[in-house]
Image (cartoon, rainbow, N blue to C red):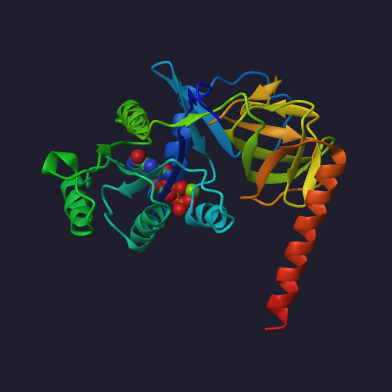
Amino acid sequence: DDEGELQERAPVITIMGHVDHGKTSLLDYIRSSRVVHGESGGITQHVGAYMVHKNNKNITFIDTPGHEAFTQMRARGAEVTDIVIIVVAADDGVKPQTKEAIEHAKAADVPIIIAINKMDKEAANPDMVKTQLSDLGIMPTEWGGSHEFVGVSAHTGQGIEELLEIILLQAEILELEANPTRDAKAVVIESSLEKGRGPVATIVVQNGTLRVGDTVVAGVAYGKVRALLDHAGKAITSIKPGEPGVIVGLSEVAEAGEKLVKVESDKAAREYAQKRHDYLRQKELSRSTK
Ligand code: GTP
Ligand code: NA
Ligand code: MG
């Protein structure tokens, strides 16, 4: 029972939208303007999630935008995203992948915030975007709808503080809570082989606290957590709910979307990993005989 142990946790955000509408630019702007770059900790891999501070709160961004990552996670049952931001270029309007993104967010039943990007451009036409989205049932609050729209520019930074504020307001409505005293449950965002460190994985903790020394399993990968790094590559000792980080010590590269959980012993970890291995193999066999 979690009663009395629940604490507010940071919202986890995924950015989606049509090709070239500015997903990467927006994430880069937020990251470079708000993430304090400390020691790199020698990590060279791309860290697939980061956290920013605003009004004494944290916001976690998954830095692997795109439908593919989102869909892959959902296919594995990893509903890590709390809020989807759909980026629409103000000079280009709603496009096929904008509609796809809306469908994905609706299927996942997560709130949508619209960021109308490229507001710095001469040809920016936010009213066009609002009209097009209203036709799809996504109507701005100022038109009597229930969706927050914010005009932004990933080039000038216009509207980005407001976007962060809207995220925090939405998060407050969602009353996101978790129990940091529990054993950790996390989701793998991305994973790779890092020279000199072995397999590393960017994760977001969903519940509980992940600590150095914990024995964990993530799909077919398992091991004792040898080190934890924050998004800047700095060594840390634990990761709390809603927060991202990098984990070192897994036996192999884990698939994006795999759940990572703490288990009691190395033996249990090996057994879980073996079971997952057998299950995936079985699935593959049954697929190939169809
Ligand atoms: P994909 O990952 O390929 O789907 O694209 P994306 O959505 O990540 O877009 P990206 O950030 O790569 O930006 C596409 C182009 O738009 C780049 O040339 C950016 O410099 C430009 N761009 C992005 N945001 C803005 C903006 O706010 N204003 C202007 N003027 N250009 C922008
Ligand atoms: Na692009
Ligand atoms: Mg991109």
Report whether residue 234 is seen: no
Can you give x and y, in whole percent of width and height, for residue 112 in the image?
Answer: 33, 45
Quadrant where the N terminus sits is: top right
The structure residue drawn at horizontal position 38% and vertical position 61%, both measured from the top left corner, is: 100
Q: Residue furthest top?
A: 56
Can you give x and y, in whole percent of width and height, for residue 14 in the image?
Answer: 46, 43
Q: Which residue lies furthest to the right in this view?
A: 267
Q: Of 216 and 37, which appears nearest the observer?
A: 216
Quadrant where the C terminus sits is: bottom right
Q: How many marks?
A: 0
Left/right placement of residue 108 relative to residue 40 reads: left
Report whether residue 8 is seen: yes
The structure residue drawn at horizontal position 55% and vertical position 59%, both measured from the top left corner, is: 75
The structure residue drawn at horizontal position 80% and vertical position 47%, both measured from the top left corner, is: 252
Q: Which residue lies furthest to the bottom in this view?
A: 290
Left/right placement of residue 196 relative to residue 134 reads: right
**Quarter of the figure with residue 274:** bottom right
Can you give x and y, in whole percent of width and height, for residue 116 in the image?
Answer: 28, 43
Q: Of 155 and 217, which appears nearest the observer?
A: 217
Task: Establish if 185 lies above or below 32.
Answer: below
Left/right placement of residue 193 relative to residue 124 reads: right
The structure residue drawn at horizontal position 26% and vertical position 50%, both measured from the top left corner, is: 91
Task: Establish if 201 lies above or below 50.
Answer: below
Task: Establish if 136 lies above or below 171.
Answer: below
Can you give x and y, in whole percent of width and height, for residue 167 in the image?
Answer: 36, 32
**Quarter of the figure with residue 145:** top left
